[in-house]
Image (tube, rainbow, N blue to C red):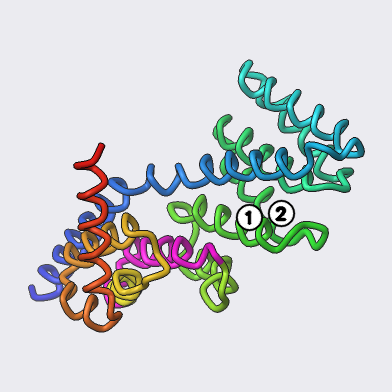
């Protein structure tokens, strides 16, 4: 009889974690879109005066136009060829664009494969390779094991990558979805006390930590972030009042 009650309790907990994941998944998926937009802006500004990049820029723009026109398959093929041949920063943008085009068509497996190609491409700046690993893990959260997700994120979590806070959040959600409560709490608690993480991300981590039965006050005190949290909140309130 006790085994039956335990199984029911585990099922209820798992359903609760799935509800939390469904609540936050669209924010996480939005990271990819925002990252692509930022990357496009950066490369176009940096390369605006270099004629050698003009042809690749035109190919990339044509592929983006095809995506907007609903021709995702054609765009993905064009971007795959551009990524293979490009000698400039457009190689990274082409991989990001191709993955986005495949995801829009529902080919999430194909998108993950493209992100993995980006992560393993030695021609590309480490910042974009890390972004590829991050987005591959992000897209894998609801279709791969937690160990596979964490394997992709391991280099970002171990080093000083600017993507580390996001990697920690994705790892925490993967652990939560797998029902690994203690591991998830530990990662969310670390994020709450991480001064390098944006305030909004720390607030999300705090909400999820509390929902999992974690101790928010201990997390704030342990990370030494309580005072900074209050200062950031006050600054945000002052800015809103000024506006």
Q: Report the side of 153 relative to 11 (left or right).
A: right
Residue 41 locus on image (x, y percent): 64, 39
Query: Is the C-beta separation of discs 2 and 1 under 8 Å?
Result: yes
Question: Of all residues shown, which one is farthest toward the front?
Answer: 242
Circle 1 packing at 10 Å, graded few (<14), some (14-19), many (20+), is many
* Residue assigned mark 1: 132
Closer-to-camera residue (199/145)? 199
- At numbered mark 2, what does the secondary structure look like: helix, strand or loop? helix
Could one spot residue 110 in this view of the protein? Answer: no
* Residue assigned mark 2: 118
Residue 131 locus on image (x, y percent): 60, 56
Circle 2 packing at 10 Å, graded few (<14), some (14-19), many (20+), is many
Q: Report the side of 97 relative to 13 (left or right).
A: right
Closer-to-camera residue (128/106)? 128
Could one spot residue 158 in this view of the protein? Answer: yes
* Most common secondary structure along the magenta stretch: helix
Disc 2 versus disc 1: distance between alpha carbons? 5 Å
| Residue 196: quarter of image | bottom left
């Amino acid at each position: 009889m006790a085994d039956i009650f335990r199984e029911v309790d585990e099922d209820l907990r798992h359903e609760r974690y799935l509800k939390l994941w469904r609540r936050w998944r669209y924010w996480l998926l939005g990271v990819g879109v925002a990252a692509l937009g930022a990357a496009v802006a950066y490369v176009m500004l940096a390369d605006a005066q270099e004629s050698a990049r003009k042809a690749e820029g035109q190919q990339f723009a044509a592929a983006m136009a095809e995506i907007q026109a609903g021709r995702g398959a054609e765009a993905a093929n064009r971007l795959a060829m551009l990524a293979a041949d490009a000698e400039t920063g457009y190689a990274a943008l082409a991989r990001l664009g191709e993955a986005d085009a495949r995801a829009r068509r529902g080919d999430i497996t194909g998108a993950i494969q493209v992100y993995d190609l980006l992560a393993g491409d030695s021609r590309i700046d480490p910042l974009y390779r890390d972004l590829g690993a991050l987005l591959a893990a992000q897209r894998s959260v609801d279709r791969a094991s937690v160990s596979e997700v964490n394997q992709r994120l391991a280099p970002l979590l171990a080093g000083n990558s600017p993507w580390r806070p996001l990697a920690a959040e994705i790892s925490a959600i993967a652990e939560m979805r797998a029902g690994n409560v203690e591991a998830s709490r530990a990662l969310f608690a670390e994020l709450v006390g991480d001064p390098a993480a944006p305030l909004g991300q720390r607030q999300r981590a705090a909400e999820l930590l509390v929902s999992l039965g974690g101790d928010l006050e201990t997390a704030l005190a342990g990370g030494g972030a309580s005072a900074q949290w209050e200062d950031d909140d006050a600054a945000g309130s002052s800015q809103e009042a000024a506006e």
